[in-house]
Image (cartoon, coloured by chain):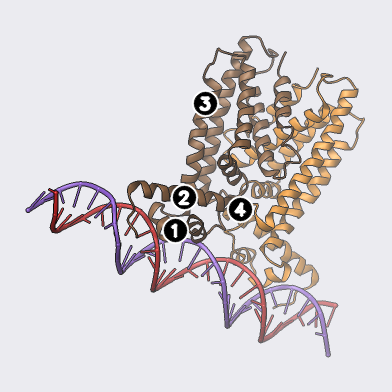
Chain colours: A orange, B brown, C purple, D red
DNA sequence: ATTTACATACATTCATGTTTGTATATAAAA
DNA sequence: TTTTATATACAAACATGAATGTATGTAAAT
């Protein structure tokens, strides 16, 4: 029984991506052989090589599937409804939402985990790092705009530059995500992430 | 010509560690074969296997060589001369010193780079992550003590808990180091790291 | 009839761990 | 002090396994 319908093929493609994510997160990217990924997906390497050129392309597909929507969501959360509520609250909500997403969505959490601690950024993967850094720059710019709003509305200490505040927030949150993801047993952060975020924002209030 | 003197052997051992660090940082840990490490060190795999059980042990040796002294240095910087100067200045100097170290010392920089983006934390390497997290906890505790000093001296806003401030600083700095190391061309951070650190500390001042 | 969506088989490369060989440093015995 | 025995510090060879990429086969969808 070969030659499935187009929809069936798409299903197998997704199953392969899903299996790859599982494999990557438990075994690490470099030690995940396509043989094992295929087996976990219930297919053979033939199917994998049919859908993806090689492991790198499979990785890219897995990464993009989660992060492209995520970037859009971030932009939307930060910028949309610009004038509807307190800018500082908007930033706080953005951070809280992201933590919440990691709590709820296994796929997103696994992807973050792979990106942050199960992957070596050399050769073909170096470009992924640059891409991530690019996304970060975008996020920082967005946060900065919101801080500018806060600045204009007189919500924060006027001698703090929005650019520096934005970078400080981004670095804080980057550190938070890293520790959140790596601290697997959750003893250090899981319980107090929300408190920390609120404290971080409170530092800025007048 | 085999059977060198003990001192010669120690030299070889160091050469292997050094070569491993170079290899790991350019090729990534998992793609660095002991064959290539040996060749870079000017020896054969025989020498490598004589000095180290396997690649994991070699990695541990490389890691410990840089990080054990580093941890001591951090403790010293943060705690020593406790009453000699402003606590906030002490934290600021600790952060600035670390960035300065990364600027000056190639070996330390490479090691950080490997730890942060050229290594997959699975299986035998998972313990390294836990070890790093343990170190982080220690650092946070130290920072917290210094913030307590600042608190008692009335230097900071009294409704900010030292524990939260310490964690906020640590996460900020963790994020900063990550970006500092990964942003290889330095376009995003290299120039403004010091400014950001000072801004971060200034946020806390009364 | 032809392309599609795979499974199967094949060839090659590469890394690892182990074993063996060996010249010499070093410590003990004479 | 010289001789001797043994452990040391590797190099070289070997054996094995695993992963990759490609090529071929094939049944069903289109």
Read off the residue under disc 1: B43
Q: Residue A97's image quarter?
A: top right
In the image, residue A8 above or below residue B194? below
Please indicate whether residue B146 sits to the left or right of residue A68 in the image. Answer: left
* Secondary structure beneath label 1: loop
Q: Disc 2 vs disc 1: Cβ atoms closer than 8 Å? A: yes
Quadrant (top left, top right, bottom left, bottom right) of the N terminus of chain A:
bottom right
Read off the residue under disc 3: B75
Q: Nearer the viewer, mark 4 or mark 1?
A: 1
Q: Which mark is residue B26?
A: 4
- The residue located at (53%, 46%) in the rendering is B126
* First along the sequence among labels 2 and 1: 2
Expressed as whole percent of the image width and height from the top left, the position of residue A117 reads: 61, 47
* First along the sequence among labels 3 and 4: 4
Which chain is mark 1 on? B
* Secondary structure beneath label 3: helix
């Amino acid at each position: 029984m070969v030659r499935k319908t187009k929809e069936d093929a798409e299903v197998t493609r997704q199953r392969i991506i899903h299996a790859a994510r599982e494999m990557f997160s438990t075994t690490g990217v470099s030690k995940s052989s396509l043989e094992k990924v295929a087996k976990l997906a219930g297919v053979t390497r033939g199917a994998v090589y049919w859908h993806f050129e090689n492991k790198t392309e499979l990785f890219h597909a897995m990464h993009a599937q989660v992060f492209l929507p995520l970037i859009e969501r971030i932009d939307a959360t930060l910028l949309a409804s610009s004038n509807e509520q307190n800018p500082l609250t908007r930033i706080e909500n953005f951070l809280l939402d992201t933590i919440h997403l990691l709590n709820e969505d296994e796929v997103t959490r696994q992807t973050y985990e792979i990106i942050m601690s199960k992957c070596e950024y050399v050769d073909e993967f170096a470009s992924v790092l640059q891409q991530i850094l690019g996304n970060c720059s975008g996020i920082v710019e967005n946060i900065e705009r919101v801080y500018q709003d806060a600045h204009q509305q007189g919500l924060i200490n006027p001698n703090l530059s929005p650019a520096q505040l934005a970078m400080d927030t981004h670095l804080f949150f980057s550190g938070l995500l890293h520790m959140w993801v790596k601290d697997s047993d959750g003893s250090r952060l899981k319980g107090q992430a929300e408190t920390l975020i609120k404290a971080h924002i409170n530092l800025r209030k007048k």
